[in-house]
């Protein structure tokens, strides 16, 4: 029960939280496949920023353990800070570490525990977000999760979260407008 264990009074905001968990790295020994581009981020943030305190999470190499994937630079962080300064960046929040977390993973647990709304990418970002109840909208264009119906059968079992699977950017944006 990660939500109950890590829930806290430090990471709370006037508006409900929404965590956008992105990644931009090699997949299956090839280039990135499923990720939120700057264009998609802009559309999502523009439509959601008035209703939610958006927190953007894209861990950098310094934050997480290497899993043999090359993390590329999407060049979205400066853009994000300039275009949407109201969006909080999880790595910046960790630099402050008001809760005294032991490491970045511990910190993610503390912030995620106070959130009910997630938009994530397949793999580790989607898995982590699925452990905290609420809604998790996952962009996954391909992968073994599709074949095994993991988003319908497996991921909801982590915490009882409502899992929504978008296979394309247009489907993702449709879900964003319906769910959030």
Image (spheres, grey):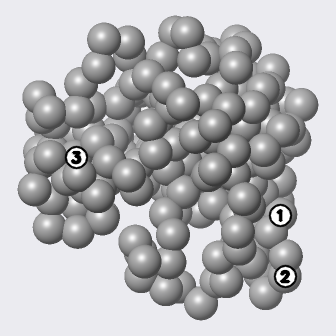
Closer-to-camera residue (24/75): 75
Residue sitting at 49 percent across and 50 percent down? 57
Q: In this view, does 121 lie to the left or right of 94?
A: right
Residue 30 circle label: 2
- Relative height, residue 112 to residue 12 (above, below): below
The N terminus lies in quadrant = top left
The answer to which quarter of the image holds residue 123 is bottom right
Q: Which of marks 3 and 1 is nearer the N terminus?
A: 1
In the rendering, at what x and y percent does residue 133 appear? 36, 32
**Label 2 with label 1: CB-CB less than 8 Å:** yes
Q: Nearer the viewer, residue 10 or 176?
A: 10
Q: Which of 132 and 16 is in front in this view?
A: 16
Q: Position of residue 15 (x, y in %)?
A: 38, 12
Q: Give the Cα distance between marks 2 and 3.
A: 33 Å
Q: Residues within 10 Å of mark 3 (few under 14, many from 20)?
A: many
Frontmost residue, 135 versus 23? 23
Residue 75, placed above or below residue 38: below
Q: In this view, does 50 lie to the left or right of 144?
A: left
What residue do we see at 55% from left, 48% from top?
Answer: 21
Number of the label disc, if any, that sits on residue 161:
none
């Amino acid at each position: 029960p990660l939500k109950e264990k890590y829930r806290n009074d430090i990471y709370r905001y006037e508006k409900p939280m929404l965590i956008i968990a992105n990644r931009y790295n090699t997949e299956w020994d090839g280039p990135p496949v499923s990720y939120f581009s700057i264009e998609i981020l802009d559309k999502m943030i523009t439509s959601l920023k008035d209703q939610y305190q958006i927190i953007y999470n894209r861990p950098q190499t310094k934050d997480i353990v290497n899993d043999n994937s090359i993390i590329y630079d999407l060049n979205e962080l400066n853009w994000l800070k300039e275009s949407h300064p109201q969006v909080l960046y999880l790595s910046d929040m960790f630099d402050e570490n008001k809760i005294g977390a032991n490491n970045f993973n511990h910190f993610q647990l503390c912030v995620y525990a106070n959130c009910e709304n997630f938009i994530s990418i397949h793999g580790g970002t989607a898995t982590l977000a699925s452990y905290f109840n609420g809604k998790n909208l996952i962009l996954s264009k391909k992968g073994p999760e599709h074949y095994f119906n993991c988003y319908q059968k497996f991921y909801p079992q982590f915490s009882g979260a409502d899992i929504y699977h978008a296979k394309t950017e247009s489907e993702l944006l449709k879900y964003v407008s319906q769910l959030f």
